[in-house]
Amino acid sequence: MIHCEGLVKIFKTEDLEVVALQGLNLNVQQGEMMAIIGNSGSGKSTLLNILGGLDRPSAGQVNVGGWDLLKIRDDQLVEYKRNTVGFVWQNNARNLLPYLSALENVEMPMLLTGKLDRAYAKQLLEWVGLKDRMHNKLHQLSGGEQQRVAIAISLSNRPKMLLADEPTGSVDTATSDQIMNIFRQVNREIGITIVIVTHDLALAGKVDRVVAIRDGLTSTEFVKRNPNLDLASIDSGAGALQEVHEAFVVVDRVGRLQVPKEYLEAVGIDGRASMEFEGDKIIITAPKTLEGENTNES
């Protein structure tokens, strides 16, 4: 569904150039539910905006659902955003029209494409648990209910992929769990690919795969050992991620290894490392002096 290779995004002003993505590699399969985690400034939101057709990549490869987003024309980009991708924002105001009811909000994208399907709009609101609230105006709904309306809106044109930017960032823990269960239900019901950007490890522990981004590069993956693991059995604490996911370091096609900085610092590696084979393992250590002592010299 998603293939990024050597993806670069550079933001330029008159006197400043910022490289947000520095050759990022990412593959996401059709029907997968995964999360992208990273600190502020790591490039995760930039990646989401590129996948959503909101930003143009500067270089590299990025293909989504058969579309080449590096070469796509403006008129094709409109079609892509209408039919391929759905977007859920952290800020409800970007998803919702306050003077419409929940049902009317879900129907609005359908009206814009001339394909009104009221039965499907009602079904979406049932899926997100708002069957009895669909005729309420937004001011009559809680923040969590509004976010569930936003999820229904993002699915109204039957996109192939759903992108969610910190979808639980403004709700409490119980509502967060409810929203994640909705994502999982929709993922299973219609097989839609779901990519969630978050900094919350507890939330990331409820998906099938987690990709960590550092400094504009994919660095680490966590893959669930048991893909059929019931969500109810996953603890909400951050430590649960380590219990149900196996960690992988990302290796690109030319063999470059992206090791998290904290791992390198823990063993005293700074700029240069020693490497040796030991059976079926590759051992990476800090360089050794002639006396056999470790040194941090680069």
Image (spheres, rainbow, N blue to C red):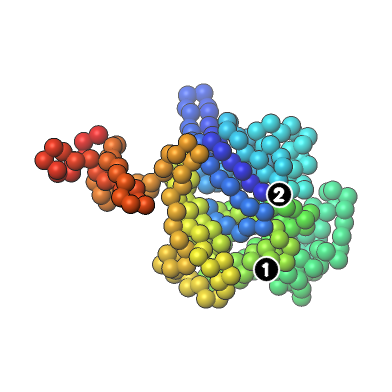
Judged left or right of residue 183, residue 126 is: right
Residue shown at the point (74%, 43%) measured from the top left = 80
Judged left or right of residue 267, residue 16 is: right
Q: CA distance from mark 2 to mark 1?
A: 18 Å
Image coordinates of residue 163 in percent, x first then y, are: 64, 52
Image coordinates of residue 204 in percent, x first then y, are: 51, 61
Q: Height in image: 200 above or below 279?
A: below
Whether residue 187 is visible here, answered yes or no, is yes
Q: How many neighbours does mark 1 have within 10 angstroms: few (below 14), some (14-19), or many (20 or more)?
A: some
Residue hosting label 2: 85
Mark 2 residue element: strand
Image coordinates of residue 106 in percent, x first then y, are: 78, 59
The C terminus appears in which quarter of the rendering? top left
Q: Amino acid at mark 2?
A: Val
Q: Are marks 2 and 1 in contact (CB under 8 Å)?
A: no
Residue shown at the point (83%, 54%) measured from the top left = 110
For the residue pair 48 and 107, the one nearer the viewer reads as 48
- Residue at the far front: name it: 279
Q: Amino acid at mark 1?
A: Gln
Judged left or right of residue 213, residue 94 is: right
- Choose the circle earlier in sequence order: 2 or 1: 2
Residue shown at the point (61%, 59%) measured from the top left = 33
Residue hosting label 1: 185
